[in-house]
Image (cartoon, rainbow, N blue to C red):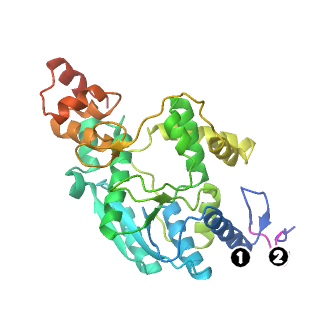
Amino acid sequence: MPVSCSSCVEKRAMLKRPKTGHSLCKECFFMAFEEEVHQTIVNASLFKSGETVAIAASGGKDSTVLAHVMKVLNERYNYGLELMLISVDEGITGYRDDSLETVKRNQQQYELPLKIVSYEELYGWTMDAIVKQVGRKNNCTFCGVFRRQALDRGALMLKVDKICTGHNADDVAETVLMNVLRGDIARLRRCTTISTASEGEGVVPRCKPLKYAYEKEIVLYAYFKKLDYFSTECIYSPNAYRGHARTFLKDLESIRPSSIVDIIHSGENLSVREGVKMPVQGTCSRCGYISSQALCKSCVLLEGLNRGLPKLGIGKHHRLHGKILSQQPLTEKEERKLKSVES
């Protein structure tokens, strides 16, 4: 027997919301999803009228839904924002080149300006070349660090006020779990924040309008709206540490759907005991980017790649930063230790 929509009661329900369990027709689901994102934006005061906002676009479901919803809400509620797309080309053959074609189609569909920045252009390396040197064990570390800085550099070129990312509730909950498992108090404290203030010169404030949107609902929204997105997983990510946190989270969600938002709220309400030493944020001595060390992670990783010492940026090698800055040669023992990488 057909189930009626629990919201309008007139139309036939087409789906059951994973987040609330409500049975809704397509139109009521669209409105509920969009209104929740709108409330997230309003409650956190994410934007001010007149701001230029860059949407980080990868061509995947999250960024595609974000671009669509931001355009809809900007027009519906007169946010007064100038929206544009910014995309990063990591240089992954058979993956990023295909997803960038989706981004270019999104640009035409949403009539938004697009800026593409590439690792090769910014760092002189592609991810394909990096993986050849470092193997597949730690490649996600390089990609994550470089992508964050690449987004900031692209945003500075566009002179935008804020960057919007497609991080959803599942992503945030996974990050909380990962930081708990790593014992990383500094990151655990800030990973649930919905927006970041300007952290210094060369860093553009970021926000997550989809912070409370479940991944399953983003997929449903994209499917029923027939949005054009790229769904292939990165060829280098199957061994990523995040994948284990994701599997654990999915198991929890299958037993208790509210687990995702419960974990987020736990992270939000975290307080650090007085007297716990936290990293002091400064700037990189080489490039000026934010860093709690003499050299930012990006510069250390790049130095390791250029010297043929791929493990230089993996693990804790802060004591070598002084040598790198003063261009002192490393000892034979140090070089031997930093050259060996497991594939």
Query: At 45% from the left edge and 52% from the top edge, which residue is drawn?
Result: 233
Give the vertical position of 58 relative to 174 (above or below): below
Q: Nearer the viewer, residue 251 or 270?
A: 270
Q: Amino acid at mark 1?
A: Glu
Q: Say which quadrant the N terminus sits in.
A: bottom right
Query: At 52% from the left edge and 79% from the top edge, which residue is drawn?
Result: 80
Disc 2 target residue = 8
Q: Which mark is residue 27?
A: 1
The outermost residue toward the top is 333
Q: Secondary structure at mark 2?
A: loop
Does the residue at mark 2 contact the one at mark 1 (Cβ under 8 Å)? yes
Point out residue 290 in the picture as x, y percentages from the top left corner. 35, 47
Point out residue 27 in the picture as x, y percentages from the top left corner. 71, 76
Q: Secondary structure at mark 1?
A: helix
Q: Taken as a whole, is the magenta stretch helix, strand or loop?
A: loop
Q: Residues within 10 Å of mark 2 (few under 14, many from 20)?
A: few
Residue 227 shows in this picture = no
Q: Which residues are magenta?
A: 6-14
Point out residue 302 in the picture as x, y percentages from the top left corner. 23, 42
168 falls in the magenta region: no
Q: Residues within 10 Å of mark 1 (few under 14, many from 20)?
A: some
